[in-house]
Amino acid sequence: MLAADRLSAAKLRAGLGHCAIGREIIVLDETTSTNDVVLQMANGGASDGLVVFAEHQTAGRGQRGNVWESSAGKGLLCSILLRPNIAVQDSARLVEWATKGVAWTIEGACLCKATIKPPNDIYIDGRKVAGVLVEMRAQPDASHLAVVGIGVNVNQTPSHFAEELREHATSLAIVFGGPLERNTLAIALLRNLDQLYREGFL
């Protein structure tokens, strides 16, 4: 992966200004799952708004135990730590918030229609381009922990997808007709999520 293609925590943080989501950003070269990392950090007392990105996941998770496949350095793979004042059974509100933020960002970047397929997938022209996985942990006498995992296919070409997925998956680069700058896209995503979170949960 070229240095210019790498996500930069410093660039992302500088582009977010006073956003609460992304007040702390970590970029890992590789991990099992960013959700696992954030859950571990949450148990260690990490603050709301922490975002962990990974250039590659070896055990990324999707909904219903599915695997989220990802090519190193081609997508946006991140997890956000939140402590929203909602009940565990209301976690669907966070899924709706995250999918809306992702769809909004995609439409702004690619000038194309992004369709949310409930509960947690985003499609373009009938092919999956992104997904969300929310995991909540009940906390006694405190706001519950929520870890919101997001995966977006950004700069993959058809050859980056397994053959059985090519008819069902796409990337922003395929739709847009060329690669996108991932740091810029990540800043837009976190800004949109921050705005929608303030409107819906604060």
Image (spheres, rainbow, N blue to C red):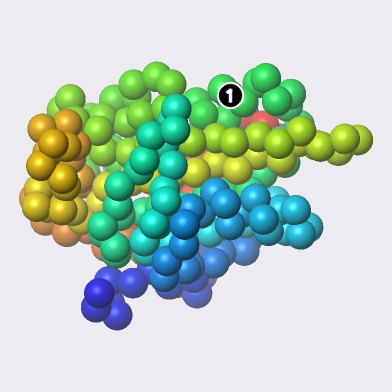
Percent x, y for residue 193?
51, 42
Percent x, y for residue 72?
29, 63
Q: Residue at x 58, y 24 (%)?
A: 93
Q: Residue at x 16, y 47 (%)?
A: 161
From the viewer's side, name the closer residue of 109 and 135.
135
Percent x, y for residue 196?
54, 36
Label 1 crowd bin: few (<14), some (14–19), many (20+), radius 10 Å: few
Q: Reply above or below: 23 against 136.
A: below
Q: Residue at x 34, y 24 (%)?
A: 116
Residue 195 is drawn in which quadrant? top right
Q: Is residue 18 visible?
A: no
Quarter containing the N terminus = bottom left
Residue 58 is drawn in which quadrant? bottom left
Q: Is residue 139 left or right of residue 90?
A: right
Q: Which residue is mark 1?
A: 93
Determine the residue located farthest toward the right in the rendered image.
141
Q: Is residue 168 visible?
A: yes
Q: Amino acid at mark 1?
A: Arg
Q: Reply above or below: 201 against 179.
A: above
Q: Is residue 8 left or right of residue 86?
A: left
Percent x, y for residue 141?
91, 35
Q: Residue at x 36, y 40 (%)?
A: 67
Q: Reply above or below: 192 against 26.
A: above
From the viewer's side, name the closer residue of 200 and 65.
65
Q: Reply above or below: 74 against 5.
A: above
Quarter containing the C terminus = top right
**Element type at mark 1:** helix
